[in-house]
Amino acid sequence: MKGTKFTMLTLLGVLFLWFGSGCYKTPPELEEAKKALQKAAEAEAPKYAPEQYKSAEELLQQAEKADVEKEEDECREKSIAARDAAENAYKAALEEAERQRRLAQEEAERKKREAEEAERRRREEEAERRRQAMLEQQRKLKLSQINNMKIHFDFDKADIRPDAEPVLRQLAELLREFPNKPLTIEGHCDERGSEEYNLALGERRAEAAKRYLMSLGIDENRIETISYGESRPIDPASNEEAWAKNRRAEFKVPVE
């Protein structure tokens, strides 16, 4: 009788364990945790929140292990923890992605501003180079204009003729634009007369032009005179027209 009772109890225990085992259900929290982790992955949590995402993965692995071992309470606990960790990873990923997006946008805007500023400076520098080049061209043209100026004299005379005065006034205006430029006045004669006489006459002509410029306010120390006499004719012919051209004073300044 006692043996039969023991056998019945043993059988009931086995049946209880069998039915208990057969009635195990995976906690719904495990599926929730999986979905939460998938959502975090789609938000690029492995990139933007790697530590939080790794923690959620590890908790999910523990929950799945408990599920395999049919440890319902352990599975539920780890699933909830995994779900919460995945949700935190999701939020952290969104925040970090937004932060990096803002930083990238700010960096792009900064580079754009720098590029625009560099372009503005480039245009200004180019405009300034063109302006300076134009000024330099104008400067050289004016200096060349001085070097092409000349006045003429009557035969055997060193007096400034009326037709020379406008030329000298224009010359004075140009010289005032270049206060640091020295001026050389060259006196010339026609071929008539001795070399010695013509050198002296050429010097008187250069000095006459110098005195006139000084009367217009040009500093005496800027002006040097030299006579070439008859040695540098414009026209080598021996006639009145050629002689009239050769009786002159020319003006020279360094162009550079």
Image (cartoon, grey):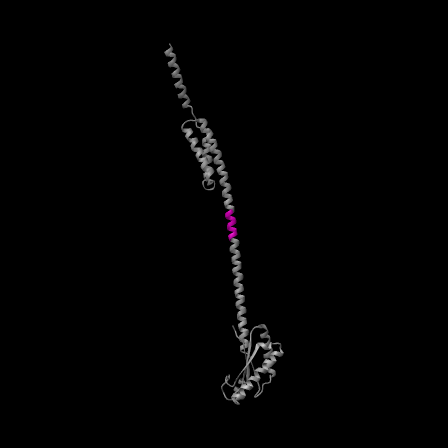
Question: Is 47 included in the stretch rendered in magenta?
Answer: no
Q: Residue at x 50, y 36 (%)?
A: 88
Furthest toward the front, the residue is: 221
**Which quadrant holds residue 158?**
bottom right
Is residue 109 shown in magenta?
yes
In the image, residue 223 above or below residue 128: below
Residue range in magenta is: 103-111
Of 58 and 43, nearer the camera is: 58
Q: Residue at x 51, y 48 (%)?
A: 105
Q: Position of residue 165 (x, y in %)?
A: 60, 80
Identify the residue at horizontal 45%, vertical 28% (top origin).
74
Asked if residue 221 shows in the view, the reply is yes
Relative depth, front residue between 158 and 34: 158
Quarter occupied by residue 21: top left
The secondary structure that most of the magenta stretch takes on is helix
Return the residue found at the far top: 1
Q: Looking at the rendering, in which quadrant would you find the N terminus?
A: top left
